[in-house]
Amino acid sequence: IINDTFTVEFHLRIINSERSIVDLGVFSAPNDMSNVILKIGEERLHVSKEFLAVHSPVFKTLFFGDFAEK
């Protein structure tokens, strides 16, 4: 924790993916539903941790697992 900010960095290897049809520009600014920033390279995406958790067991464990840091 630095300056009241908790940062987690992890690296993923993508084995398979489908081409995204989502315009990522939608996520470039904070909105009413965003509560976390997902940084991919230099891109900062404002997203909902609940939405990420529903679609990924990794994010579900990271955000809602039984960790003292959550």
Image (tube, rainbow, N blue to C red):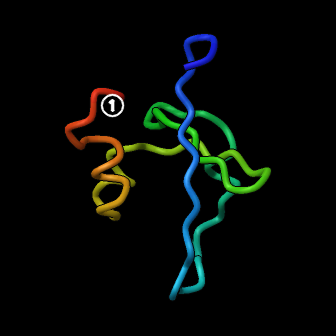
Q: Residue 43 at x, y = what percent?
A: 74, 51
Q: Residue 64 at x, y = what percent?
A: 25, 41
Q: Residue at x 28, y 58 (%)?
A: 54
Name the image quarter holding the C terminus: top left
Position of 46 relative to 69 (above/below):
below
Name the image quarter holding the N terminus: top right
Q: Residue 39 at x, y = what percent?
A: 65, 48
Residue at the limit of the structure toward the left, as seen here? 66
Residue at the limit of the structure toward the right, as seen here? 42
Q: Residue at x 55, y 67 (%)?
A: 12
Position of 9 relative to 33 (above/below):
below
Position of 50 relative to 1 (above/below):
below
Disc 1: which residue? 70
Q: Residue 51 at x, y = what percent?
A: 36, 52
Residue type at the position of mark 1: Lys
Nearer to us in this view, 24 or 63: 63
Q: Residue at x 62, y 17 (%)?
A: 2
Quarter assignment of residue 66: top left
Position of residue 38 in the picture relative to residue 51 (left or right): right
Q: Residue at x 50, y 36 (%)?
A: 36
Position of residue 29 in the picture relative to residue 38 (left or right): right
Position of 13 relative to 51 (above/below):
below
